[in-house]
Image (spheres, coloured by chain):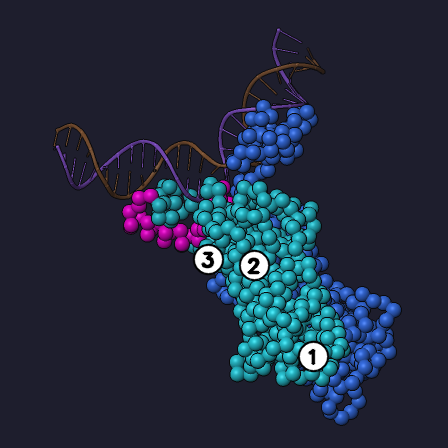
Chain colours: A blue, B cyan, C purple, D brown
Amino acid sequence: MKNTGDRRRTIYDVAKAAGVSISTASNALNGTGRTNAETRERVRRVAEEIGFRPNALARGLLSKRSHAIGMLTNDTYGRLTLPMAAGVSEVLVDHGVSVFLCATNNDPRLAQLHLEALLDRQVDGIIFTATRLDLEPPVQLSRLPIPVVYVFAEGPADSVTFFPDDEQGARLAVDHLKELGRSRILHITGPKDYLAARIRAQSYLDACGDGAEAMFGDWSEEWGHEAVQTVFARPGPKPDAIFCGSDEIARGVIDALRDLNVEIPTDVAVVGFDNWEVVARQTRPPLTTIDMELKELGHRAGLAILSLSKGEPVPAGITRLPCRLVVRQSCGSPLQSD
Amino acid sequence: MKNTGDRRRTIYDVAKAAGVSISTASNALNGTGRTNAETRERVRRVAEEIGFRPNALARGLLSKRSHAIGMLTNDTYGRLTLPMAAGVSEVLVDHGVSVFLCATNNDPRLAQLHLEALLDRQVDGIIFTATRLDLEPPVQLSRLPIPVVYVFAEGPADSVTFFPDDEQGARLAVDHLKELGRSRILHITGPKDYLAARIRAQSYLDACGDGAEAMFGDWSEEWGHEAVQTVFARPGPKPDAIFCGSDEIARGVIDALRDLNVEIPTDVAVVGFDNWEVVARQTRPPLTTIDMELKELGHRAGLAILSLSKGEPVPAGITRLPCRLVVRQSCGSPLQSD
DNA sequence: GATCCATGATAAAAGCTTTTAGCAGAAAAA
DNA sequence: TTTTTCTGCTAAAAGCTTTTATCATGGATC
């Protein structure tokens, strides 16, 4: 009895089967208008029986809200994007909102194509997300008829934007090292033209004061390796802790330290950044690092675009979400483990 | 003049501005029906001028084709999924088809919710993709009114399914090693309950014959490390090449070999599997490995679902797409580089 | 008995597009 | 001149849902 035919059941079928008009059927199903409790129950039962599900297209056409949003990303690699996207999708599915995934590959033509498709589909909003690169959106997003939320990317002045709190994250790392009694902390991080790298470095410098040194390079293991070799080859005091700008860098650092027969964490403690599990768990010793709470970032971005699409106000400007310290063994806190 | 108002332009606006009826406007824009060349041009120009874009919801409502598909994945981690999804999205955007991303986290409730949402949205098809785990879909997909394509996951007997050609990939690795003169090849791979691991191992055994040995463990660096230690600790001849089931395992293998002062590739050549760039490029020496052509897999899956949704026939059964050998330096072919 | 009100239902419109059937006029054929 | 055939265009319907305005009925009030 449950939708055996080929055609999808419409509200018209429900109405006929329940012996009411389509308006009554609609009212009964949605709890709108005035309906007798008994009728309402009957309609609902019938709808359930014949397997009726409202057509989202028709609904959206009328209500001008498609209950779908677009997620425009240029991060094809996905280390940051996918966990974030999963967070968005997770929080929105319970509100009946679906997510279009649009990978632009940094190609403006593709971005434009995707954007137009999204607008044609009447999406209720767009989440734009980029890699950490300080790129501007590959397409004009500022004068759109629908709200836009930025994650990992900066929009126009009054836009709603989410970032991890790089400053707090860096402080978390430095404080942890200080609490463990380390005093000569070195910072090895990515390219200076990444805003995130600059912010973390500044936070580190502010916290460590005199003698602090931030080495900029790139986000690779190789750079971590190279930086350590440089530091340990030159004269002068050696660091007793290294705060790295990414887990990959930390991995290179740890490798280089082992090559130099430096004990971790006894001689040098190491903290990473990202909590990229595949890397962080596989270093020896397992890496203490900073988690950017990507999923939570996705949740917040999802809720923000949801509110905006309903016309509810959302505080504009950059919201920075706190990072979390994940203690493993590279700093010598063997009591706690992950 | 370009859509300054708040309301979206409809075909009604175009018709009025061009001084024709909406049917003529529609015909002119779509090149259907009979229209005078001159009128057609005028309508198109006007549409362009006022910034008209057809409402995909209305269009889909009528045509019963939403030009959207759903991608259901339980791979929240995303190493395999996102590149594949990017391939799907890339190939479909040019056909005007958008992709809903649905992350199920292996939660049946979530999967069901997503599936219902997709059906309500009248998607033209669904791509189901899983991790390599031999899990069955978290939700009933077999009796759907729309086509389903499986990637990295096996569907019912007569379904359309795409996999990388694990057998050919493994052979590629072994052949490469043999061509370089290696004869005592060892295989270190993931858990035996992964079909992909079994297939690759079997292919390896078939190619190497006597003396070949496949060690199953898990997909971790640690396991690669451990396996090498075991092999080099026991008596008997040592391998002169190791074919690994994943790049992570290869990484562990390389680390362990270096700890043992075994030269790579002089003493032992190493081949990985995945071409996961972050890992493969960062090993020292950079890893020669097998690329599963995830993007191409996405392309093919996208085109398949497109054809199916149009009612065009697509050969059922499992299609295995060839892998590609990526030569770096871990096998000692310094001539070619990546 | 006439008036008013509340209740529960319904018809019709709106949302935007595409498609079908049909109409008016001109050119061609009889 | 009358009939047929094109040509270019249009009115209307269909697709499915929600919402607005309206209607019928029965009970309460005067």
Residue at the spot x=63%, y=74% of the render? Answer: B185
Q: Image quadrant of residue D25?
A: top right
- A213, C28: nearer the viewer: C28
Give percent across and percent down for residue B172. Answer: 55, 70
- Residue A261 in magenta? no
- Which residue has dot 3 on it? B94
Instruction: Report crowding for label 1: few under 14, some 14 to 19, many 20 or more residues within 10 A (C-alpha).
Output: few
Instruction: State how far apart marks 3 and 2 are (Cα).
Output: 24 Å
**Tag nearer the camera, 2 or 1:** 1
Residue type at numbered disc 1: Pro
Q: Is residue A135 left or right of residue B58?
A: right
Q: Are marks 2 and 1 in contact (CB under 8 Å)?
A: no
Query: Which chain letter matches label 1?
Result: B
Camera-side residue of B61 and B24: B61
Q: Which mark is residue B163?
A: 2
On screen, residue A18 versus residue B48, left or right, reads: right
Q: Is residue B56 magenta?
A: yes
Question: Alpha carbon of mark 1 to alpha carbon of mark 3: how far?
Answer: 56 Å
